[in-house]
Image (spheres, helix red, strand yellow):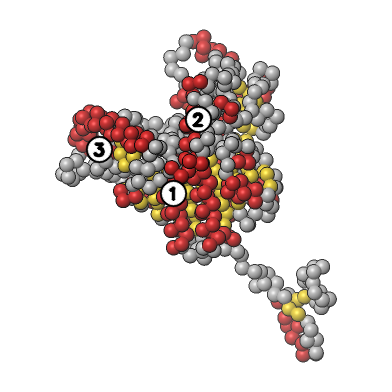
Amino acid sequence: MTGSRRGPSSRSSVPVLSVTTLGYLSCLLLLGHADARVVVSEPFGRPPPPPPPHIIFFMVDDQGYRDVGYHGSDIHTPLLDQLAAEGVKLENYYVQPICSPTRSQLMTGRYQIHTGLQHSIIRSRQPLCLPRDAPTLPERLQRAGYATHMVGKWHLGFCRPECLPTGRGFQSFLGSLTGSGDHFTHQSCDGAEACGFDLHDGERPAWELSGNYSTLLYTERVKQILRSHSSQKPLFLYIALQALHTPLQAPAHLLRRHSSLGNRPRQHYAAMLSGVDEAVGAVVRELRTQGFYRNSVLVYSSDNGGQPLSGGCNWPLRGGKGSYWEGGVRAVGFVHSPLLKRRGAVSRALIHVSDWYPTLLGLARVPGKDRRLDGHDVWGAISQGLPCPRTEILFNIDPVSRRPGEPPQQMALRQRRGFGIWDTGVRAALRVGDWKLLTGPMGDGDWFPPQTLPVAPSRWQGLEKRRDQHGKSVWLFNVTADPYERSDQSEARPEVVRLLMARMAEYNRTSVPPRNPPDDPLADPQLHGGVWTPWLGPEGSEGSVGGSVGGSGTLALGAYRRVAVRHCKVCRLRALFKKVGFRMQRASLFF
């Protein structure tokens, strides 16, 4: 008789039998073979699968590549350093150069060219948000049994109620809807003429929380969520801190720690980063206290590179926020989890922010695959050091960026530079393997050494300047051998340029038209009680608007728009005075 064995670790030589031999086993027992043992074979003997992990995702706003202790920063981040050292540091990790694109790709797993968000951010007055045909990460997780909560900055559109975080899969939300705002008063301005309150608890303005510093406020809400939630139910917690985005503000006790820094923007930036460091540490302590930690995965990511003129530092990378140079798109990122197969490691795997969507769904064991995703499941590469499925990243193709009205000779030159394959006047960037191709107007390509930070911006005349971007529309770098983008290879390696342009053209054929509606005067907070809030009705109800004028109820859309336009002309001066008042109030907090 043969039976299935456990292997070398079996504790005796007695046969290990499957359920198919139970009848024969009964005979053995009757004959006195009482030491025969039964191990029930699959599926009856398989231990139950572990519960899905809790997922804690930190998105930090405008953190520079150098602005973490383990990258050599002059700002100490002891808690972030410890968490990263005990986890896996992601040292070939990319995001997008500005806020909304990074967040949209985290939430959908799709490139900008496939959601119509190729150009710029979603502005506060734009009737625009994430497309409804793109299921979000929290929507998928919620359907799989997760509790989903968000605190912090949304910045993915809010023109309609279904665009809000609570309309896109989050069961609770405390935070801001716009791109930036005062960290204490939570007032946000879009230009000089449109200012309003932007702190929301669910779908209502949280007036009662005004005056609380954003980082501390969000940390306390996270603690409340953890204390009221059962660790037996899987949790997705998205913590999108408003720091380190301007305005540069921090509580006095944090500012005092960095009083030795001579540069005022850097001093305030450092204080904000200390607040972020403490917030992450406080959340991890609460995870331990409430019993979540042992089955949790924590991801930390910046949303784009730092802005050097606002205190950030990306040295030794080139450029910064808003650019497709490495300083704009290579991000601070790490994973910390007891579930990692290897810890204390550095991953050089090529990872993009769009990869978190399928990776986290895979960890949560959410069934089904979406063929429209641009992200890859990279958990094996992170946790075990396995080969990474990602080999290239399309950063973006922005057709709106083309300069209109160029002379024919300039257009002909672009065609020659693009080998007839690609219009090099289009702002685009692509990495394939070691090579990175950039075309179009790339913006500021300078390096900002950290030694320039102690002096005022007006005296930053000693910066390294590169003139190679002037008059150029094609750059090629081997970013593995030259991560600082100092040696342009576009003329030396035309065959690589041609191949990458052909790949760019393939991507472009799959793109959808950019969606860039003009600002809507109906969005003005002065029409909605001084609050940034949805101003359009639910999709398909174009006869209604998201607010009323003078308490008279719903007006016809055309009449409402005429009233709004007249009102906006009157309120611009009033809003300008308000904005000045907010800035004066903010300045008083520093003294």
The amino acid sitting under disc 2 is Asn
The answer to whether the residues at label 2 and label 3 have Cβ atoms under 8 Å apart is no
Q: Is residue 490 left or right of residue 220?
A: right
Task: Point out the image quarter for the C terminus.
Answer: top left
The answer to whether the residues at label 2 and label 1 have Cβ atoms under 8 Å apart is no
Residue at position x 43%, y 14% in the image: 405
Of residue 279 and residue 127, the one placed in the foreground of this image is 279
Q: Is residue 516 visible?
A: yes
The amino acid sitting under disc 3 is Gln
Q: Is residue 338 left or right of residue 285?
A: right
Measured in 3D between alpha carbons, the distance from the residue under mark 1 to the one under mark 3, in whole angstroms, is 28 Å
Task: Point out the image quarter for the N terminus.
Answer: bottom right
Residue farthest to the right, as pictured: 13
Of residue 226 and residue 255, the one placed in the foreground of this image is 255
The amino acid sitting under disc 1 is Leu
In this rendering, which labeled residue sits more in front, label 1 or label 3?
1
**Residue 487 rendering spot, x and y as whole percentages:** 66, 22
Q: Earlier in the sequence, mark 1 or mark 3?
A: 1
The quadrant holding residue 294 is: bottom right
Q: Earlier in the sequence, mark 2 or mark 1?
A: 1
In this rendering, which labeled residue sits more in front, label 2 or label 3?
2
**Residue 37 rendering spot, x and y as whole percentages:** 76, 80
Q: Which residue is mark 1?
A: 216
Q: Which residue is mark 2?
A: 263
Q: Which residue is mark 3?
A: 526
**For residue 420, above or below residue 339:** above
Measured in 3D between alpha carbons, the distance from the residue under mark 2 to the one under mark 3, in whole angstroms, is 37 Å
Measured in 3D between alpha carbons, the distance from the residue under mark 2 to the one under mark 1, in whole angstroms, is 25 Å
Total number of numbered labels?
3
Residue at position x 48%, y 53% in the image: 237
